[in-house]
Image (spheres, helix red, strand yellow):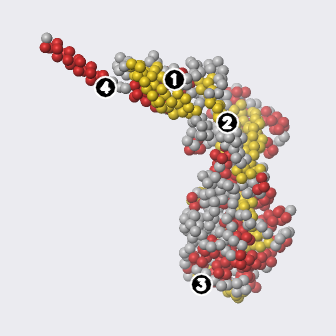
Amino acid sequence: MASVLSVSILGLSLAACSAEDRPAPEEAAAKLAEGLSGLDVSGSSFQDSTAEEINALLADSVSGMAPLKPAVSVTSVEEVSDDEATATLSYVWDVSAGDEDYSYETTVELQRDEEDLWQVRFDPSSVHPSLAPGDYLLREVTPVPRGEIHGADGQVLVTERPVWRVGIDKTRLESAELESSAAALAGFLELDPAAYTAQVLASGPEAFVEAITLRQDSVSPPAVFQAEVAAIPGAAAISASLPLAPTRTFARALLGSVGEATAELIEKSGGTLSPGDKTGLSGLQQQYNSQLLGVDGVAVRTVSAANVSSAPLFESDGVASDPLQTTLDVRLQTLAESVLADEPSASALVAIQPSTGNLLAVANGPGSEGAQTALLGQYAPGSTFKIATSLAMLRSGATPATTVSCPEELTVDGRRFNNASTYPAQFLGEIPLRQAFAQSCNTAFINARGTVAQPDLAAAAQALGLGVDAAIGTPAYFGSVPAAADGTLHAASMIGQGEILVSPLALAVAGASVAKGERVSPVLVEAADPAAGGETAGSSGSASASGSASVSGSASASGSAPGSAAAPSLTTAEAATLREMMRAVVTDGGVQLLQGVPGEPILAKTGTAEFGSDTPPRTHAWVVAIQGDLAVAVFIEEGELGSTSGGPVMKAFLDGLAG
């Protein structure tokens, strides 16, 4: 009897312990919500179904919402009895780029099994209350047109323009025909036949394998072109549109392009981009993509097994995208690109309106090979920097009439400095500063190093805007002038060599500052979104003198961090004196060919900067010019002299403007 009693008591004890340790339904509900959020409920147990079967049902039920996943949480769990409970689940779908999400609640029944584990009774209504077996949720997107990019005076720079999507439709060909048709189309389009054939063969059996997208205005008339393509079995030209500039080359490095999202962009987007989505790929199109996209309209419906759609369960109207406003002038930009078209090396032309700071042209020649030479190039300015050196000399007490010494050559700490081989002999010796500037006497400016210390030179450069950062709405490099340099480095700095660097943009800013009579802060993207633009090259990749990407240090002239206080601006009187000296370059100096340009008088300064280790050294060619309310900088990476290489380009541009 005692033995039986002991066994009974032990059984009661174990039962009591087991009751206390049984899992709560809240745990099962939380596990289910976690799995639903990842669209994988393998961690849950189900009544009458395996987890694999429920995963398949779940995938079918939300197939029309891909690639989105819901955020699912447990709202409440109500225990109906010791072995039954009802869980209320909250679903939130981030269906739109706007602020409004699609949210709703569902319920699931939980049942405790013989092993005290909670099992879920799951069906399509567990995913959405309106889903019946065979139904699925569908997200429909109504795209809003991509925003345009505008230029000065409301000119439309980038808008939807017609294109041809040319490729092979594999559904129209037998397998044996694929290689010959792909090769024929590639030959017609002047593409690599082997590469395109491999692309066609690797694509799915029902794919349209695009070979190229062409502007419709760049090929034969529509009917003719479509017939030419259709003559190749399986080939087709499909009419479409893309946001494009007026021409293929128009401000291409600046404006960028739009196309299908790359794998890298999709990965970085945090789920906002999917394969096949159109997005900005480069330039302003990528930088301001969120503004230009707007917010697409979205609707969510159920679709039955019979392919019947319900009324919208959720609807969000689209928000039209805002145009991006820039200061570019179509006529000036087109002209700038045309005068650079025949230059084989990297080249650039930047034009600024001094009164406003508006950038009217930011052009890169074909030799730049897509690099943003105009805004991000980093090059020694050579004798164009004598504008800053002259300002420093004026501040030390000199005037244009001050006599300076211009020997044929000069030695500083063992390094020999010469004038250009074409320097006119009649202007050697003791000459006025005005003539030393007009003829570009290197030795005269180096001789001034005793009265112009390096910090004074850096301050004069900043007074002109060189090295002074400005938020133009896209990455830009504004130059660097060391505040400390001794010996030969200080001597070289006096003539724009040594460690001094500028971009074509920076030199155009200096010219604009002389024209206006105060330091000019340039503008390119108006009312720019601070989150998208305004960087300087101090925090972004920049084009080096070789055209390759590099990361520069601070863009400020003193080497201080971007945003630090710049030296005071030049004064009205200083600017007037510099304009007088720059006019002498045209009337008496190296760019007398500019005298014949119609319109207001031209003021200018040429520059030749040595680079590399070749003998004789290779040279950059520069010209900066002012005419009325316009300042222009021309740069040629592999030039001869500023006057002989840059001068004709500048003349062609200014003549073209005179029209």
What is the spatial separation of the Cα atoms under label 3 and label 4, in whole angstroms? 91 Å
Apparent side of residue 44 relative to residue 323 in the rendered image (left or right)? left
What residue does disc 1 label?
126
Apparent side of residue 632 relative to residue 112 in the rendered image (left or right)? right
Residue closer to the observer: 237 or 324: 324
Describe the element under mark 1 as helix, strand or loop: helix
Return the disc, 3 or 4, that comes first in the chain's sequence.
4
Q: Amino acid at mark 3?
A: Gly
> Is residue 335 visible to the viewer in this orientation of the structure?
yes
Disc 3 crowd, CA 10 A, few/some/many (<14, 14-19, 20+):
few
Return the disc, 1 or 3, that comes first in the chain's sequence.
1
Residue 25 is tagged as none
Q: Position of residue 334 (x, y in %)?
A: 78, 56
Residue 652 lies in quadrant = bottom right
Q: Residue at x 25, y 21 (%)?
A: 14
Q: Amino acid at mark 4?
A: Asp
Do the residues under discs 1 and 2 have CB atoms within 8 angstroms?
no
Q: Tell me: residue 431, above or below residue 235.
A: below
Residue 317 is tagged as 2
Q: Amino acid at mark 2?
A: Asp
Give the mark toward the camera: 1 or 2: 2
Do the residues under discs 3 and 2 have CB atoms within 8 angstroms?
no
Return the disc, 4 or 1, that comes first in the chain's sequence.
4
Q: Tell me: residue 364, above or below residue 51.
A: below
Return the disc, 1 or 2, that comes first in the chain's sequence.
1
What residue does disc 3 label?
450
> Is residue 382 visible to the viewer in this orientation of the structure?
no
What is the spatial separation of the Cα atoms under label 1 and label 3, in whole angstroms? 85 Å
Describe the element under mark 3 as helix, strand or loop: helix
Q: Position of residue 322 (x, y in %)?
A: 70, 47
Q: Quadrant of the C terminus?
A: bottom right
